[in-house]
């Protein structure tokens, strides 16, 4: 994506918006107050990790655990009446430490559930407060402030106690039936364990990057009821250009039998000052599966054809690859991986709200012989790691309350086991997550 791409994106969206009638926009306007919503999500999160080789623990016993409560309040207004509708989005979030197992809270950083202070102690509490102004012109919505983008190249993360956010300007357009366009230019990020809203950009494998902004543009198009495609491009200034293409299809074979498949492809190339070194990565994944009643079985394959790790924004969900799962991304240079996944929805067995999932993934052929200095990994003798292997197994059970005063309350238990050669940790992990959403308005 070139430097002028964000401006071009705005021009394209405004052009599309001009084709929509003013009357249609006014008819859909609900009003600033009438269209408002206020929700509170209570999230109780427990995690423990057993590092099988004793690493990554303050007490050097190879074990960490933490239990915390998150309260996430969100307010979204409607839009004022008129050709240009105005509104606001705001949020207030609070994270509370409940227990850290006598200091066994982990080494700090983004792997932790809670932030850790300079003395190596888990913080008793931390908070996030932010918001964004928004404007709607016909079918285009622009937001400026603290935002939560949801694209394959920039996607906020929500796998910890509090969600990640970004600061900048985003826009969305849905003026063409079946097509959703999204773009944005962001100049800061706030990772899940950070209170500040103006953090520097950081990537998962390259660490903090002195980049002034990240910009993205693209869209999702639903061709018909059975097929959808996605195309996106992004730039992390002075670090990379990333391009994404995705395809997903479903093919009904009978009343209760459906075949589904998908493809994901990323192209990542160094850019500008090359703050993460020189690289030219191609990585892709593909899956095929079948769904019968409440049962779903899928097989996926993934390959990184580049010489470096395929990287993405830290703690974000900006990696739409089938074999990027709870702990491992299976994205090392040259790595090939496959995964078998099974899902069970108990609704068809008379227990709505109860579901199970298990998956097993195995990767091989990871080779750092030609990696650049940023992504290089070496053995104890200083030689690049070669012929690296790993596997991961996930098991999850979830129940969502269907009726009564606790409706939509969910209970989730996750167990993860991963084993690897020299380049990754051996780890057993358990997560218990209880969420109780409340719709106030």
Image (cartoon, rainbow, N blue to C red):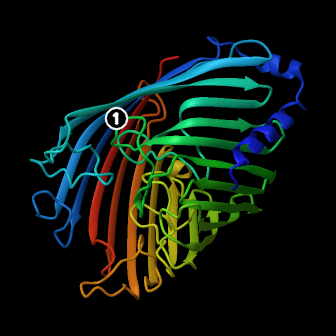
Could you tell me if residue 224 is visible in this image?
Answer: no
What residue is at 34 percent from the left and 44 percent from the top?
A: 433
Q: Badge 1: how crowded within 10 Å, few (<14), some, or many (20+)?
A: some
Q: Is residue 132 visible?
A: yes
Is 228 located above or below residue 290 in the figure? Answer: above
Residue 116 vs 284, above or below: the answer is above
**Residue depicted at x 59% and y 45%:** 150
User: Which quadrant of the figure has residue 34?
Assistant: top right
Residue drawn at 57 percent across, 63 percent down = 296
Give 120 or 322, whichever is nearer the viewer: 120
In the picture of the structure, the residue carrying the numbered disc 1 is: 195
Pick the quarter of the image with the N terminus. Answer: bottom right
> In the rendered view, does 291 fall on the left or right side of 94?
right
User: Residue drawn 56% across and 41% down?
Assistant: 186
Residue 217: give x, y in percent of width and height.
69, 48
Answer with left or right where residue 168 lies relative to residue 41: right
**Residue 294 placed where, x, y %?**
57, 56
Instruction: Estimate the x, y position of residue 419 in percent, counting from the top left.
Output: 32, 75
Q: Name above or below for residue 307 compared with residue 374.
A: below
**Between 198 and 389, the one nearer to me in the picture:** 198
SS for dot 1? loop
User: Taking 198 as reference, is 295 above or below it?
Assistant: below
Image location (x, y in percent) of residue 73? 43, 25
Q: How many marks?
A: 1
> Among all residues in the image, which is located at the extreme front?
273
């Amino acid at each position: 994506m070139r430097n002028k791409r964000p401006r071009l994106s705005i021009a394209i969206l405004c052009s599309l918006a001009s084709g929509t009638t003013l009357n249609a926009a006014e008819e859909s306007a609900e009003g600033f107050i009438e269209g408002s919503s206020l929700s509170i999500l209570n999230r109780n999160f427990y995690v423990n990790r057993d590092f099988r080789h004793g690493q990554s623990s303050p007490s050097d016993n190879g074990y960490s655990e933490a239990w915390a409560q998150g309260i996430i309040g969100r307010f979204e207004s409607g839009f004022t009446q008129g050709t240009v509708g105005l509104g606001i989005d705001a949020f207030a979030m609070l994270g509370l430490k409940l227990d850290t197992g006598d200091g066994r809270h982990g080494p700090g950083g983004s792997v932790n559930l809670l932030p850790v202070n300079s003395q190596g102690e888990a913080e008793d509490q931390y908070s996030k407060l932010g918001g964004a102004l928004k404007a709607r012109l016909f079918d285009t919505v622009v937001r400026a402030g603290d935002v939560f983008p949801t694209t394959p190249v920039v996607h906020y993360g929500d796998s910890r106690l509090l969600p990640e956010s970004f600061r900048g300007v985003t826009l969305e357009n849905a003026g063409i039936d079946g097509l959703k366009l999204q773009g944005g230019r962001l100049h800061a990020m706030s990772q899940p364990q950070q209170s500040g809203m103006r953090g520097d950009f950081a990537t998962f494998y390259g660490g903090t990057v002195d980049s002034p902004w990240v910009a993205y543009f693209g869209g999702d198009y639903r061709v018909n009821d059975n097929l959808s495609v996605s195309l996106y491009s992004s730039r992390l200034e002075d670090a990379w250009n990333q391009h994404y293409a995705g395809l997903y299809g479903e093919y009904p074979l009978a009343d209760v039998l459906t075949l589904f498949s998908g493809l994901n492809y990323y192209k990542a190339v160094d850019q500008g000052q090359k703050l993460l070194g020189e690289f030219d990565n191609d990585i892709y994944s593909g899956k095929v599966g079948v769904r019968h009643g409440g049962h779903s079985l899928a097989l996926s394959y993934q390959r990184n054809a580049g010489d470096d790790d395929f990287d993405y924004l830290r703690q974000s969900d900006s990696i739409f690859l089938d074999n990027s799962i709870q702990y491992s991304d299976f994205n090392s240079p040259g790595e090939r991986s496959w995964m078998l996944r099974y899902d069970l929805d108990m609704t068809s067995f008379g227990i709505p709200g109860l579901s199970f999932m298990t998956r097993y993934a195995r990767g091989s052929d990871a080779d750092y012989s030609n990696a650049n200095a940023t992504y290089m990994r070496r053995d104890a003798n200083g030689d690049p790691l070669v012929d690296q292997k790993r596997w991961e197994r996930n098991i999850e059970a979830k129940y969502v309350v269907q009726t009564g005063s606790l409706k939509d309350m969910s209970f989730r238990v996750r167990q993860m086991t991963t084993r690897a050669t020299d380049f990754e940790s051996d780890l057993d992990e358990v997560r218990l997550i209880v969420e109780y959403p409340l719709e106030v308005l």
